[in-house]
Amino acid sequence: MSPRILVAVLALALVAPTSGLATPDGQMTWALHFSLAPTLFEPAETAGVVSPFMILYALHDAMVKPMPGKSMAPSLAESWSVSPDGLVYEFVLRKGVRFHNGDPVTGDDVRFSFERYRGISAKVLKEKVAAVEVPDPGRVRFRLKQPWPDFMTFYGTLATGAGWVVPRKYVERVGEDGFKKSPVGAGPYRFVSFTPGVELVLEATESYWRKTPSVKRLIFKSSPDVTTRLVMLKRGEVDAAYGLPGEIGEEVRRTPGLTLRPTPFASTHWLLFADQFDASSPWRDRRVRLAATQAVDREAINQAESLGFSKITGSIIPTSFEFYWQPPAHSFDPAKARQLLAEAGYPRGLEAGDLWCDVSTTAAAEAALSYLQAVGIRARLRPLERAAFLKSYQEKKLKNLVYGLSGIGGNAATRIEAFAVSTGSFAYGGYPDIDALFRDQAGELDPKKREALLRRIQELMHDKVMYLPIWQLSMLQGYGPRVAESGFGLIADYPWAAPYEDLKLKAK
């Protein structure tokens, strides 16, 4: 018997024979609440949000990924194992899988995709992995520099896009820009066309390993204006619409033929006090940060914007994540907020500068801003298109206040690493005690000791008031009468429709 510890076995339950099935038919059209950009078609550039996976689940495939009933399901890798010393992870590739251009998916493509990965947590992945070996085309071996309990969390969940595989030969032939213009993947749908600011068109591939998709063509229409999305859904111009705030969601719920589908997922939202590390900023004072936190009525925002379906958690860590710690609640107390501002030297309030947000979160950001202004914290709302917002956020170009969010997978450590440690991709600074504890937990193999360290970090984040947590979002989505299976909620803690090969339209 092999000395390796088997972590996952053949995923026979995921495989459905494609012979004898009807060919894909029909078209399903989606109204998106943000504008698509070519960077979202590219696994190598996944940022700290879940948005790109809306497209990746269609165009591409991963070695391991979340699927219905499984947080880490074998996909391009039919199995994997880890050595007893925790230093070697070996993956066995599924046989016969090809990219949309006909090239076989090989271990060389897996290694190439990992090495070109430059998205969130690329730095920590490259630092921890000593080598990626390809003993033969059907096997890939990752050698770590030291045991790392979170390797599969980073590689096999939506914490990063490092495990999503692209064709090496094609990328090298067309170049990076060419790949974004005409991406080739191994997913259930192939790229047909993209009109910036208008729509993305994908078409089913009948040779997808898991099953042949039921729906022939998927069209994703960019429609940032929510009223437009509602009109399109009511008229039947689209079959499903994303991101419907409370009032619109309520109208969908009472409209005959339309279905409202709240989709809870691992997306926490918060206000980042970006200037808290600047000695000249009012946000340096914990009392000012605490005043802002007590000024916002989160439950009222929840009822107004998501019909009460979101969770008020007080944390940037999703409740379902391993090592989550539930902080005590900061009460809604405007009088206390004003008192704290006065104690900090701002009895008449303060000019807080700009509050930056992704345009799709404008409603929630505006609601939070109204509560801040009511106690004297005056700021201007500055919405940006999603791609521009994420780029500016990650490049640390935003100042004052930032409406932060993340819906990617992982655990408490991965979320802390990206947003709360001084070296994090989206961190605007840090605290020495948190940085030291994070380094300690990264090498701790005892789960109980590691949990204690991660919980202590979360306690310190709460005590220092590093963030103003808003909620853990439950998105309101709607779909029309032609849809038999929308895909919403099939994958736990995931907001978008997936797997796309499971979508179904009603018989005509």
Image (cartoon, grey):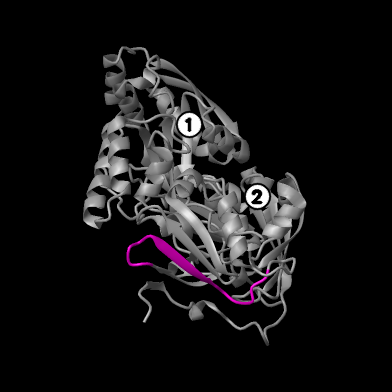
Disc 2 marks which residue? 229
Residue type marked 2: Arg
Q: Judge whether 269 appears above or below 157 on screen.
A: above
Q: Which residues are magenta?
A: 83-98
- Quadrant of the image occupied by residue 60: bottom right
For numbered disc 2, what is the local secondary structure?
helix
* Along the line of sight, the residue nearer the viewer: 22 or 144: 144
Say left or right for 422 vs 211. Answer: left
Other residues around mark 2 within 10 Å, as few (<14) / some (14–19) / many (≥20): many
Q: Amino acid at mark 1?
A: Val
Find residue 216 and report its image quarter.
bottom right
Sequence order check, earlier mark of 2 and 1: 2
**Farthest-out residue, front:** 135
| Of the pair 114 and 273, the residue shown nearer to us | 114
- Residue 299 in view, yes or no: yes
Q: Would you name the residue on which mark 1 appears?
A: 402
Q: Which mark is residue 298?
A: none
Residue 254 at least partly seen: no
Q: Nearer the viewer, residue 118 or 327?
A: 118
Q: Position of residue 397 (x, y in %)?
A: 54, 27
Our reading of the magenta stretch's main secondary structure is loop
Q: Is residue 455 left or right of residue 102?
A: left
**SS for dot 1:** strand
Closest to the observer: 177 or 35?
Answer: 177
Image location (x, y in percent) of residue 195:
77, 49
